[in-house]
Image (spheres, helix red, strand yellow):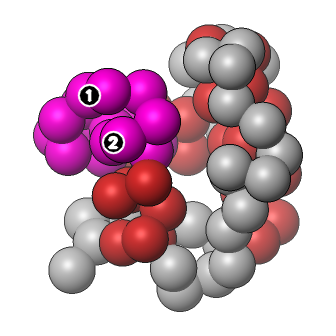
Amino acid sequence: MAEISISNKDWNRVKIKLQRKYNHLTDQELQYSEGQEESLITRLMDLVNRDRKYVVFTLQKALVNIDNNRL
């Protein structure tokens, strides 16, 4: 079970932050639908070559500061 919950509204901002941090990520790779957090986390683990804990932390950090452009 995913440790986070991301709404479609928030995802657009989170996606922009991820693409700034990892400029090799494409829109296609970052496809997301609400409720598919587990799939997103697993995919990001492969794409950025990091462990689950780091990916979840990064997503949580992006959500906490949703209006800030920094990640």
| Horizontal side of residue 4 vs 21, given as left or right | left
Q: Which residue is mark 1?
A: 50
Secondary structure of the residue carrying numbered label 1 = loop
Magenta residue check for 64? no
Query: Residue at 69% of width from left, 78% of height from top?
Result: 33
Query: Which is more toward the observer, 32 or 4?
Result: 32
Query: Which is more toward the observer, 18 or 29?
Result: 29
| Horizontal side of residue 39 vs 33, given as left or right | left
Query: Which is more toward the observer, 40 or 17?
Result: 40
Q: Does 25 sit above or below residue 15? A: above
Question: What is the span of residues highlighted in magenta in the rendered image?
Answer: 44-59
- Asked if one can make out residue 64 in the rendered structure from this viewpoint, the answer is no
Secondary structure of the residue carrying numbered label 2 = helix
- Amino acid found under the numbered disc labelled 1: Arg
Query: Residue at 72% of width from left, 62% of height from top?
Result: 31
Which quadrant of the rendered structure holds the N terminus?
Answer: bottom left
Query: Residue at 73% of width from left, 42% of height from top?
Result: 15
